[in-house]
Structure formats: C-alpha cells, structure tokens
Image (cartoon, rainbow, N blue to C red):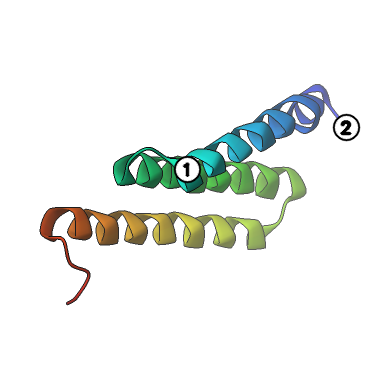
Amino acid sequence: MNMVEAVIYFAVIPIFSISYLLFLMVAYKGPTLSDRVLAADVFFYSMAVLFGIMGILLRSPIMTACTVVLVLWAYALDIYIAKYLERGELGD
C-alpha cells in the first residue's frame, strides 16, 4: 500500500462516512423540502465520487458502472423534484 492509498483508506473514507450520516440526517429532518433535496443530491454525488475512487483503487469496472448509474439516478431525482416544486404535481 502506497502513501496515497493509505491516506484514502484511513482519512478520506472515515470523513466521507461521517459526512454521509450528516447528509442523511438533513435529508430526513430538513427544515424545508428544498433542503432535503439538496442534502440527498450531495449525498448521491459524493457517494458516486467515493465509488469512483474505490473503483480506481480496487481496479474494478463494476464500481465504475455503479458510479454512472448512481449519478444518473440522482439527476433523475433532481428533474422529478424540480417538476414537483415548479408545478405542485407529480403526474405526466
């Protein structure tokens, strides 16, 4: 294990884990719907970054595919919630 991998394993991943818990708390108890959506967005995109980093470190193409799917899902959530906030309905 080289120095970069050690820093990622012992510093970056624990910091990301703590931030994920905070994002989920805000997403669950956010003061407004906009704050909840923003917390969910940050959670999904930072999770995608972590998946990308882990995929590079583990040399796993599956993690890269998971990253792409997670980012597309987060983007679809953004579009769906933006439509709800703009029109007040979730229909067609």
Which quarter of the rendering shows the C terminus? bottom left
Q: Residue at x 57, y 60 (%)?
A: 66
Residue 58 shows in the view: yes
Q: Is residue 58 above or below residue 76?
A: above
Left or right, residue 87 beside residue 40? left
Residue 45 shows in the view: no
Q: Could you say where residue 35 lies in the image, as x and y percent from the top left?
A: 36, 39
Mark 1 surroundings: few (<14), some (14-19) or many (≥20) residues within 10 A: few
Q: Residue at x 22, y 54 (%)?
A: 82
Q: Is residue 36 above or below residue 15?
A: below
Q: Could you say where residue 89 lies in the image, as x and y percent from the top left?
A: 17, 67
The amino acid type, in three-letter code, at marker 1 is: Lys
Q: Which mark is residue 76?
A: none
Q: Could you say where residue 28 lies in the image, as x and y percent from the top left?
A: 49, 47
Q: Which element is circle 2 on? A: loop
Q: Are marks 1 and 2 in contact (CB under 8 Å)?
A: no
Which residue ends up furthest to the bottom in the rendered image?
92
**Residue pointed to by mark 2:** 1
Q: Residue at x 19, y 75 (%)?
A: 91
Q: Give whichever of 65, 9 is nearer the camera.
A: 9
Which quarter of the rendering shows the N terminus? top right
Mark nearer the N terminus (1 vs 2): 2
User: What is the spatial separation of the Cα atoms under label 1 and label 2, in whole angstroms?
Assistant: 40 Å
